[in-house]
Image (cartoon, rainbow, N blue to C red):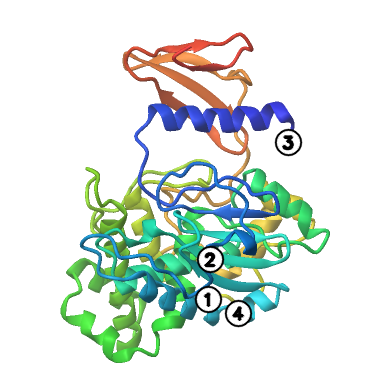
């Protein structure tokens, strides 16, 4: 990717964040000098590089108090995340890596993938906003683990460019999975690993499961134990939606009203909150599990994992449900994707008017056509370098 293309992609993303409503979801953090970090629960400013010397607290020594109305303390969240990380130490070890968990070190919860193959799950104070339950805390921990182990499709930012380059030198040990793939991993792989033996707790959800979720779970699973686990996963998917939207006016996600939109290019960032909840539920319905400790789709030459490589998609296909119940929703995942034809749209973007509103239109082969609505009083214009954007 040339510098102009990369500048265009991230400038366009920045413009979008200024003129569009920003969903309160996990967002990617700034690149770190010797590691690549993912996920804050809210948009976060650039963070300094983290080293052991700069950490004010070590694992398990957090003094963070729960947020008002919170149902889980940081100490409890740390124990939950540690259990999840321990459950996947064998997978990390297969890649020369190890999971660690910290609390109180950062404000924004995220996974930091170190060049030395230390995969650090940082629990931030943002985690504690209500209504955080133990099951939601487990889903969030599993989401972070999914960034390391979830596989295809992968994120495509400078952080992943660095990871791909480092793999050739024995660094990092993985390439970060996309946001929704991490959600899918959480309910398809990680939470069942943690909860499958908790039969009594799972069975309690048979009394509260919605008719919609029950019908879908019963169709996917024949045994009572598997159905009960599916009910619990359906419940935590919706609980996560309520937790993620806390404090804003977005509609509460509901499994019975799935996002019916369809992307033409796989979205490696955050889709709608409803789409994320749908993805988590689809993971609960998928009976195809990872075949071992390999990261699905992470195959050489590693540069191809950041492109629309049919070889990468084919390599990962046996580890997921690729069609029907349990498959990843089309609101973010486009199977058999190909690069978009951007002919007719200048490399630096262009201005247009759609439904009487001034918009900026950009196109990149690996992200597709994106249209950003400009705010009132800040119509689209072109700057001295030829970049199209709002407010010029």
Residue 85: mark in rendering? 1
- Residue 81, quarter of picture: bottom left
Q: Mark 3 points at which residue?
A: 1
Above or below, 136 relative to 385: below
Q: How crowded is mark 2: few (under 14 residues within 10 Å), some or many (20 or more)?
A: many
Q: Number of callouts in the render?
A: 4
User: Do the numbered discs 1 and 2 sit on residues whose CB atoms are within 8 Å?
Assistant: yes
Q: Which of 66 and 99 is in front in this view?
A: 66
Q: Name the residue under label 4.
A: 89
Task: Give x and y (percent) for residue 108.
Answer: 45, 54
Per the model, the C-alpha gap separating discs 1 and 4 is 6 Å
Q: Which residue is drawn at 31% across and 81% down?
A: 227
**N-term mark: 3 or 4:** 3
Per the model, the C-alpha gap separating discs 3 and 4 is 34 Å
Per the model, the C-alpha gap separating discs 3 and 2 is 30 Å
- Residue 199, quarter of picture: bottom left
User: Do the numbered discs 1 and 4 sit on residues whose CB atoms are within 8 Å?
Assistant: yes
Q: Which residue is drawn at 20% across and 62% down?
A: 69
Q: Looking at the image, can residue 251 be seen?
A: yes
Q: Residue at x 48, y 14 (%)?
A: 351
Tell me the element at label 4.
helix
Per the model, the C-alpha gap separating discs 2 and 4 is 13 Å
Residue placed farthest to the top in the image?
Answer: 384
Task: Give x and y (percent) for residue 78.
Answer: 43, 73
Task: Give x and y (percent) for residue 254.
Answer: 24, 57
Tell me the element at label 3.
loop
Per the model, the C-alpha gap separating discs 1 and 2 is 8 Å
């Amino acid at each position: 990717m040339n510098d102009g293309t990369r500048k265009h992609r991230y400038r366009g993303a920045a413009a979008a964040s200024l003129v569009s409503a920003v969903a309160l979801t996990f967002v990617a953090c700034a690149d770190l000098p010797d590691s690549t970090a993912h996920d804050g629960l809210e948009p976060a400013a650039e963070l300094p590089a983290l080293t052991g010397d700069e950490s004010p607290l070590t694992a398990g020594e957090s003094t963070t108090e729960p947020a008002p109305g919170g149902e889980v303390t940081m100490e409890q969240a740390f124990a939950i995340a540690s259990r999840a990380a321990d459950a996947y130490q064998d997978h990390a070890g297969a890649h020369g890596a190890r999971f660690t968990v910290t609390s109180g070190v950062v404000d924004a919860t995220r996974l930091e993938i170190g060049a030395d193959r230390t995969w650090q799950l940082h629990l931030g104070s943002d985690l504690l906003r209500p209504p955080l339950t133990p099951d939601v805390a487990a889903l969030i921990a599993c989401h972070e683990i999914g960034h390391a182990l979830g596989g295809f499709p992968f994120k495509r930012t400078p952080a992943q460019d660095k990871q791909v380059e480092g793999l050739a030198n024995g660094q990092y040990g993985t390439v970060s999975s996309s946001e929704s793939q991490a959600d899918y991993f959480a309910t398809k792989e990680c939470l069942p690993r943690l909860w499958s033996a908790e039969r009594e707790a799972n069975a309690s959800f048979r009394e509260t499961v919605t008719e919609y979720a029950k019908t879908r779970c019963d169709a996917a699973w024949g045994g009572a134990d598997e159905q009960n686990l599916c009910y619990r996963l359906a419940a935590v998917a919706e609980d996560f939606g309520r937790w993620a939207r806390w404090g804003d006016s977005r509609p509460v996600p509901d499994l019975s009203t799935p996002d019916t939109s369809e992307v033409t290019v796989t979205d490696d960032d955050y889709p709608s909150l409803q789409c994320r909840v749908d993805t988590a539920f689809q993971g609960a319905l998928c009976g195809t599990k990872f075949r071992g400790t390999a990261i699905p789709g992470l195959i050489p030459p590693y540069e191809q994992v950041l492109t629309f490589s049919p070889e990468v998609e084919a390599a990962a296909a046996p580890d997921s449900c690729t069609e029907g119940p349990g498959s990843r929703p089309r609101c973010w995942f486009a199977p058999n994707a190909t690069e978009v034809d951007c002919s007719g749209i200048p490399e630096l973007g262009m201005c247009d008017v759609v439904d009487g509103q001034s918009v900026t239109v950009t196109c990149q082969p690996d992200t597709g056509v994106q249209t950003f609505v400009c705010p009132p009083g800040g119509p689209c214009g072109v700057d001295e370098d030829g970049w199209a954007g709002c407010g010029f």
